Image (cartoon, rainbow, N blue to C red):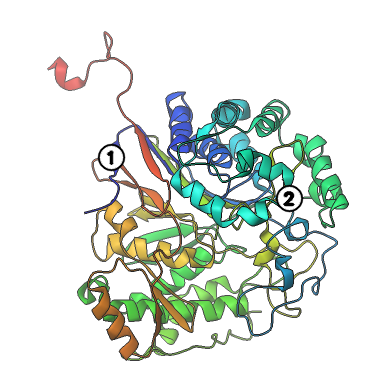
């Protein structure tokens, strides 16, 4: 039994981590828009109603497959400001994460990278959508102007970030009304942000990248020790990239390439898993969880060594995603004992706060897009007068100089985002994604395996318990069946086990059934909702089905 229920529809489906955002996307389908219009409208709405997760000055990828077979990825990920230096933060000794002294890469103006979200979304609408930017933004403007309900989830994250939010008056004014964390069920109105969105809807993305909003960001940075300048903003570029592709048991997986590491490593892990009968091992068994832990650690070892901004590092994508390399790495796995791994050796010729949405329409267009301002409420900074939160994506860069993903001016920040499209026999089968930082690609891979290997319905596949392991700690959600025995069995194999409530965030996605019906699902880990569009125009004289005329 699942916590939430799936939705089905015949004309189109939208899923996201907030029901109002899914409503915005569905509204675009009803207006005659396509899946691209629906997905981008959903994302704009999420910047309003899921403010702790995404902003128009943030980072992400839009994975698009059109009905004519065209596949493209819009990379609107953040870049390091031009004034940044490799040693700008002081790493905390002994940490394997990116923690630095005084949390300067997590909170405040120095944590902000140059955001590309707005430009990426506007480009998607201009090139691949059917509606205008103003039409697509209208629901978000309405939600910001009229207000939206505070969910227990938003309340909980606000409480977690309360102390840092209080440091920034323009943020506290909105998200700590009357000076305190808002009650669940109360209403938040974002008047300044509504005006900002309305101005962008009228004037386009240049209103930020070459106009008043960008100037406001740059001025706020200069006044508070931030590094982002107007030159950084004006020179920001999106890239359209060919997706990475791989196969798993006859299904094709399509996702963003570097600087996203996620789909690359999903394909890498699937290549290793193909050598094992995962279905026979069973879901949630000691054998299966142990196997996932080992392939995940192997992928992370290669990620640390080889994957970064492709403009600064020659990422060996073809080698990392090859079946031959997977066979080589598979031989390193001990199915009975936990191990730690080093990265593979490339041939000499080869040099937690995010959100997601999916959309499919009845023409065959598919969009999966993941976007972020990184941690809860990002930098916690709101640019005065704009209502716009800023990201803290500098935390994603390695604060230690001289490494693959170390800080360098203009460098594209490395991501684990995995907005994936899955095809079967050349036809759309499934699209999905999730927030969750470094844990994203492991969670997405497990969900795909749940559907393909364990033949779970989509809702069950998304809500099923997850695990995560980058070494030396294995996390397993408490929702695994026979949890106590599972934990004991893993400890017996040498794993150091922790048991959080959840691994990664609220997954959502869509499956297209053989009869053409869309099935949408969103899991219990966030406020997600699936919303579909069925029905259609009335029959009129001369438009009767052929079977009626016999």
Q: Which residue is mark 2?
A: 237
Q: Please state if 133 lies on the left or on the right of 325 as rendered.
A: right
Q: Which mark is residue 204?
A: none
Residue toward you, 476 or 309: 476
Residue 72 in the image, given as x and y percentages of width and height: 55, 50
Residue toward you, 443 or 326: 443
**Mark 1–mark 2 distance (CA, rounded to whole Å):** 38 Å
The residue positioned farthest toward the left in the image shown: 550
Q: Which corner quadrant of the image does residue 301 belong to?
A: bottom right
Observer able to see residue 325: no
Q: Which corner quadrant of the image does residue 412 belong to?
A: bottom right
Q: Residues within 10 Å of mark 2 (few under 14, many from 20)?
A: some
Residue 404 in the image, given as x and y percentages of width and height: 68, 76
Q: Which residue is mark 1?
A: 516
Q: Please state if 414 lies on the left or on the right of 33 as rendered.
A: right
> Of label 1 and label 2, which has the lower sequence position?
2
Mark 2 falls on what kind of element? loop
Residue toward you, 433 or 241: 433
At x 67%, y 56%, the residue is: 164
At x 34%, y 87%, the residue is: 491
Q: Is residue 169 above or below residue 403?
A: above
Q: Please state if 499 lies on the left or on the right of 545 as rendered.
A: right
């Amino acid at each position: 039994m699942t916590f939430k229920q799936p939705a089905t529809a015949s004309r189109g489906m939208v899923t996201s981590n907030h029901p109002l955002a899914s409503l915005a996307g569905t509204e675009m389908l009803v207006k005659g828009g396509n899946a691209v219009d629906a997905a981008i409208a959903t994302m704009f709405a999420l910047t309003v109603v899921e403010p702790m997760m995404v902003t128009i000055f943030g980072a992400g990828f839009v994975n698009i497959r059109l009905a004519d077979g065209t596949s493209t990825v819009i990379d609107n990920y953040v870049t390091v400001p031009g004034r940044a230096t490799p040693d700008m933060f002081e790493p905390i000794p002994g940490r394997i994460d990116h923690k630095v002294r005084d949390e300067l890469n997590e909170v405040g103006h120095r944590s902000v990278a140059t955001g590309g979200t707005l430009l990426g979304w506007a480009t998607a609408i201009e090139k691949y959508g059917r509606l205008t930017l103003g039409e697509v933004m209208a629901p978000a403007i309405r939600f910001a102007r009229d207000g939206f309900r505070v969910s227990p989830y938003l309340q909980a994250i606000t409480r977690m970030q309360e102390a840092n939010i209080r440091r920034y008056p323009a943020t506290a004014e909105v998200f700590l009304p009357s000076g305190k964390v808002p009650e669940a069920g109360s209403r938040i109105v974002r008047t300044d942000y509504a005006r900002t969105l309305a101005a962008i809807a009228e004037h386009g993305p240049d209103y930020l990248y070459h106009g008043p909003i960008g100037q406001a960001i740059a001025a706020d940075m200069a006044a508070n020790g931030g590094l982002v300048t107007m030159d950084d903003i004006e020179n920001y570029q999106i890239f359209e990239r060919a997706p990475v592709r791989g196969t798993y048991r006859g299904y094709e997986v399509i996702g963003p390439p570097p600087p996203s590491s996620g789909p690359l490593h999903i394909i890498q892990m699937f290549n290793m898993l193909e050598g094992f009968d995962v279905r026979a091992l069973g879901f949630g068994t000691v054998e299966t969880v142990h196997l996932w832990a080992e392939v995940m650690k192997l992928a992370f070892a290669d990620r640390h060594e080889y994957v970064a901004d492709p403009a600064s590092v020659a990422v060996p994508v073809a080698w990392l995603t090859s079946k031959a390399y997977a066979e080589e790495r598979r031989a390193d796995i001990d199915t009975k004992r936990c191990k730690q791994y080093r990265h593979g050796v490339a041939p000499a010729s080869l040099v937690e706060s995010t959100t997601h949405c999916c959309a499919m329409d009845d023409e065959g267009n598919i969009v999966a897009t993941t976007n972020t301002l990184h941690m809860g409420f990002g930098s916690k900074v709101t640019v005065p007068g704009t209502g716009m939160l800023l990201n803290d994506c500098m935390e994603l860069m390695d604060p230690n100089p001289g490494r693959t993903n170390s800080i360098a001016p203009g460098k594209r920040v490395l991501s684990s985002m995995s907005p994936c499209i899955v095809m079967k026999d050349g036809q759309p089968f499934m699209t999905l994604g999730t927030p969750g930082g470094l844990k994203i690609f492991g969670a997405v891979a497990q969900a795909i395996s749940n559907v393909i290997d364990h033949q779970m319905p989509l809702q069950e596949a998304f809500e099923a318990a997850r695990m995560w392991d980058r070494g030396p700690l294995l996390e397993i959600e408490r929702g695994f069946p026979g949890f106590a025995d599972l934990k004991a069995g893993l400890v017996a194999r040498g794993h150091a086990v922790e048991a959080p409530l959840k691994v990664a965030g609220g997954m959502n996605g869509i499956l297209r059934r053989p009869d053409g019906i869309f099935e949408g699902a969103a899991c219990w880990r966030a406020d997600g909702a699936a919303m579909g569009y069925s029905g259609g125009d009335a029959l009129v004289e001369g438009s009767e089905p052929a079977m009626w005329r016999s």
